[in-house]
Image (cartoon, rainbow, N blue to C red):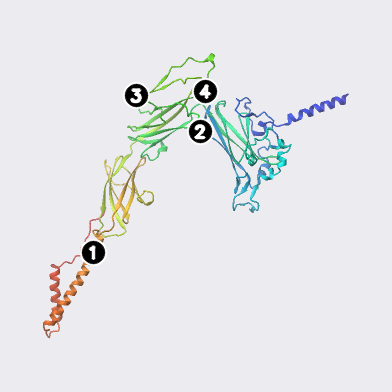
């Protein structure tokens, strides 16, 4: 009888071993478990409890540091990048994107196989096989896939069968997401995404984990895992972008006096949860201009004094929310008015059974207002006459005025007529003493005739102003100094030839009708007397200076 008791006890123990020995999802998916781990969570739609059993035979579990991870993928280490679009306003959706990063030279083709890129070399040289993993290697046996044992292999870790969507056999990877004591299984390719609604998610930072398995014929292989922190908040996530014309660096929160600053509110709402909400923006610029309320996310404001100012913004939005129970329904609220200068914005209760919750978002910043360069103008352009003609360059003087503080630097960019292709960039310090009046002359050289675009900027430590103009450089026509010089030279040469010809003709005439004396110097003296007569006739007065060599005044 004693042996019978021992045998029955052994049977009972054996019957209890499988449930006790089976892993649960939270044991297979989490590397660490803190002492304050909470087992009770609100249910996420479409997710399952991580207390369910995990099929370790089909999905082996490798802990961190297991040497098998190093050989889990052919050709190198597989990585995974897991990101989220949090922070998320409670009630909205938060989306997670997982993307596999293959070893160098590998990619997933349209058929679902992992192939080597063209001309790719692995650590041992060019691969004779274009496939790192051929999809048909684990799905080629159609009888095996459609046989009676199909449910034992084409299933998720909890035993649920793969969804047989179109092309599902090309999906090589099994993704298991884990958060808030729940898991979600998905069959996919090298990049997948999953979203959860945060209406039942505890406020604050949370952790999302993902484990990725490569499908194999008999046993799936774990290849990588990752986790990311996401945040759920009851305040509207927002950021304010501040910009101003002529401001040199908008990121330092330092702006110029007497120029409007543009404030653009960017609400982080990737799931478009607030699309149907009435949103109001309450501004306090800290300069005693009062409270400004607007329903536009963009606003311009002008500071007229120097100093530091505290900017405060409150964003208010009515979002869908649960209605209170009839026994605890509060009295119907009266419409609340929000003062917005001369205009009033009214919030009304939306009729029907839909209830709303007012959510708020906040932004604060300290703004520094200083004096800067406000405006620049080119009031005059003058062609500079050069003493020595230089065919390649033309000089232009630009008389520039500005308003505001005195600049410390002037830069010009000379471009083609479309202002797209820069040809010359010149910057110079402004080291002249202009007193309280901003007036200076900028001289620039232009190569050749044509039309140019010139951008001129004046700057100091905090501001940068710009103006542009089109400059037309004429060709070297007949009236230009170089052409005039060349023309004068040609005229002199022609005149000299003409005088020589006339002198020869007159000389021949005198030789024919007048006897020549015996003196050996008579012929030469007669010719000299005649040439001198011709010179006096054509060039009255002796001039030694060449008009082309006259000195010009010095350039600026």
Q: Is residue 218 visible?
A: no
Q: Earlier in the sequence, mark 1 or mark 4?
A: 4
Residue plotted at (23% across, 67% down): 490
Task: Please name the residue that numbered disc 3 is placed on.
Answer: 342
Residue occupied by mark 2? 270
- Helix, strand or loop for disc 4: strand
Q: Earlier in the sequence, mark 2 or mark 1?
A: 2
Which of the labelled discs sits on residue 487, or is there none?
1
Residue drawn at point x = 16 percent, y = 75 percent: 503
Q: Which mark is residue 321?
A: 4
- Earlier in the chain: of badge 4 and badge 3, it is 4
Residue lying at 14% horizontally and 84% vertically, measured from the top left: 520
Q: Earlier in the sequence, mark 3 or mark 2?
A: 2
Q: Earlier in the sequence, mark 3 or mark 1?
A: 3
Q: Secondary structure at mark 1?
A: helix
Query: CA gap, disc 3 to disc 1?
Result: 76 Å
- Measure the C-alpha gap from mark 1 to mark 4: 91 Å
Which quarter of the picture shows residue 311?
top left
Left or right of 355 on screen, residue 122: right
The one nearer the camera, 174 or 366, is 174
* Marks 3 and 2 close (CB-CB < 8 Å): no
SS for dot 2? loop
State the mark number for residue 280.
none
Kindly report the distance in space between the C-alpha atoms of the residues bearing marks 2 and 1. 75 Å
181 or 435, which lies in front? 181
């Amino acid at each position: 009888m004693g042996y019978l008791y021992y045998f029955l006890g052994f049977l009972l123990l054996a019957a209890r071993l499988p449930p006790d020995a089976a892993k649960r999802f939270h044991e297979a998916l989490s590397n660490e478990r803190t002492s304050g781990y909470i087992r009770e969570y609100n249910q996420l739609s479409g997710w399952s409890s991580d207390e369910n059993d995990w099929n370790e035979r089909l999905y082996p579990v490798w802990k961190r540091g297991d040497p098998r991870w190093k050989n889990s993928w052919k050709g190198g280490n597989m990585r995974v990048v897991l990101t989220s679009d949090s922070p998320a306003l409670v009630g909205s959706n938060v989306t997670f994107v997982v993307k596999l990063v293959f070893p160098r030279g590998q990619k997933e083709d349209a058929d679902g196989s992992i192939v080597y890129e063209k001309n790719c070399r692995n650590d041992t040289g060019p691969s004779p096989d274009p496939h790192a993993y051929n999809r048909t290697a684990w799905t080629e046996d159609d009888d095996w896939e459609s046989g009676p044992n199909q449910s034992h292999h084409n299933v998720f870790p909890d035993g649920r069968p793969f969804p047989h969507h179109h092309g599902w056999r090309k999906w090589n990877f099994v993704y298991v997401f884990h958060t808030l004591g729940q898991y979600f299984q998905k069959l996919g390719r090298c990049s997948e995404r999953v979203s959860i609604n945060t209406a039942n998610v505890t406020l604050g930072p949370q952790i999302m984990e993902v484990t990725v398995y490569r499908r194999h014929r008999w046993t799936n292989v774990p290849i990588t895992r990752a986790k990311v922190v996401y945040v759920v908040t009851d305040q509207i996530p927002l950021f304010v972008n501040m910009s101003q014309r002529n401001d040199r660096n908008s990121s330092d929160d330092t702006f110029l006096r007497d120029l409007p600053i543009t404030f653009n509110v960017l609400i982080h709402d990737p799931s478009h949860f607030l699309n149907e909400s009435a949103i109001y923006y309450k501004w306090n610029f800290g300069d005693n201009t009062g409270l400004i309320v607007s329903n536009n996310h963009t606003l311009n404001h002008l500071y007229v004094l120097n100093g530091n100012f505290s900017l405060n913004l409150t964003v208010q939005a009515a979002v869908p929310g649960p209605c209170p129970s009839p026994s605890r329904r509060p009295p119907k609220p009266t419409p609340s008015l929000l003062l917005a200068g001369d205009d009033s914005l009214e919030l009304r209760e939306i009729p029907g059974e839909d209830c709303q919750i007012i959510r708020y978002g906040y932004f604060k910043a300290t703004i520094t207002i200083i004096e800067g360069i406000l405006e620049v103008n080119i009031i005059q352009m003058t062609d500079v006459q050069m003493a020595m003609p230089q065919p390649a360059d033309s000089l232009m003087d630009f008389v520039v005025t500005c308003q505001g503080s005195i600049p410390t630097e002037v830069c010009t960019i000379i471009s083609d007529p479309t202002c797209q292709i820069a040809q010359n960039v010149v910057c110079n310090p402004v080291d002249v003493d202009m007193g309280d009046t901003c007036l200076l002359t900028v001289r620039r050289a232009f190569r050749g005739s044509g039309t140019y675009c010139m951008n001129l900027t004046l700057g100091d430590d905090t501001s940068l102003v710009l103006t542009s103009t089109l400059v037309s450089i004429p060709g070297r026509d007949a009236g230009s100094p170089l052409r005039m010089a060349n023309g004068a030279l040609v005229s002199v040469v022609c005149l000299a030839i003409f005088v020589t010809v006339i002198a020869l003709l007159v000389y021949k005439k005198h030789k024919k009708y007048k006897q020549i004396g015996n003196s050996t110097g008579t012929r030469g003296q007669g010719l000299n007397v005649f040439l001198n007569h011709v010179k006096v006739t054509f060039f009255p007065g002796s001039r030694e200076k060449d008009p082309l060599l006259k000195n010009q005044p010095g350039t600026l």
